[in-house]
Amino acid sequence: MADETYKGDVLQKIAGVSLIVGAILTGVFNAIFPRVSDPDNVQSVLTKLGDNDTLAQIASVGIALGIWLILAGIAGIYRSISTGAAAPWARLGFYVFIVAAATWTASFAITLGQAGAAADWLETLAAGEQAAAAIPFTVGAALYTAGTSFFAMAVFANWTAIILLGIALSLNTLYPKWLGWIAIILGVVTIPAVGIPLAFDGLTQTVDTTFMILAGLTTLWILVLGIWITRREMKAM
């Protein structure tokens, strides 16, 4: 039987809006984040970030805020599925997404520092201080390596949570089953296509392009889910 305990729960209204706004923020700021054609070249990455440090920092904060809003939305989904076979999967999905949100936050915090170090490096070079420029470059390169590792772990956690939530949605009668199956497919494709090569080979152009496509599709899924929840709650009023 469907769990109807969600009715009258303000968290459901918050969840729908949070998913919509979170999807928009992550989509927009992901699109404007400065990228290079050869992301495995540290010097190229630092040059791009240094030239666009403010934009990179704003985009990082914007994406992080979007992910926090999505976490609030997933909390609403978890709250609405409290009984039946779907409940354990919803609970696991929510908990794993907390890990994902924390890892994404750490990753973007590293990007903030990396952009600052890259800007300092370019400024020092422009001042003709070649020897002194080695320090911010080394810092930026170290942050790039650490950021890539956090990025890989965030991908694993994020899309594992998506799979778990997809299973919950597909087993529960409160939500359309097709939303659950789309989530499962997105997770099953993204982890081997992005997470594994990112963890073992680093960030390449192929991995970055694949990530942008799959992240965009996942963002669209989150947006549709948020709209569906919002419409359900409006009809229930």
Image (cartoon, rainbow, N blue to C red):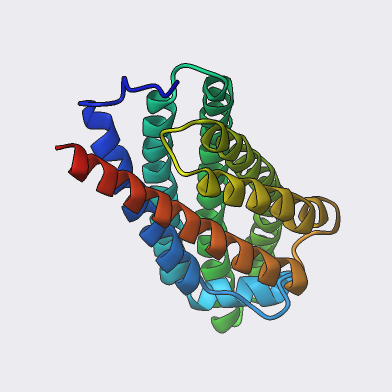
Task: Residue 102 in the image: state x and y as whole percent.
Answer: 53, 36
Residue at (73, 55) in percent of width and height: 189
Left or right position of 26 against 208: left
- Residue 123, compared with residue 140, is above or below; it is below
Give the camera-side residue of 129 and 117.
Answer: 117
Q: Where 181 sits versus 208, above or below?
A: above
Residue 48 at x, y percent in the picture = 58, 77
Asked where in the image residue 207 lies, by quadrant, the reply is bottom right
Residue at figure coordinates x 41%, y 56% from the top left: 224
**Residue 60 point in image, percent of width and height:** 46, 58
| Front residue of 36 and 211 | 211
Residue 91 appears left or right of 7: right
How many labels sit on residues?
A: 0
Q: Residue furthest left?
A: 237
Quadrant occupied by the N terminus: top left
Residue 40 can be seen in this image: no
Q: Residue furthest right?
A: 200
Please say if 99 is above or below 176.
above
Identify which residue is drawn at 54% across, 73% down. Answer: 50
Is residue 220 rendered to the left or right of residue 65?
A: right
Residue 223 placement (x, y as % from top left): 40, 56
Q: Nearer the viewer, residue 58 or 123?
A: 58
| Residue at point 25%, 26% (across, down) | 7
> Which corner quadrant of the image does residue 217 belong to?
bottom right
For residue 178, say whether it is visible: yes
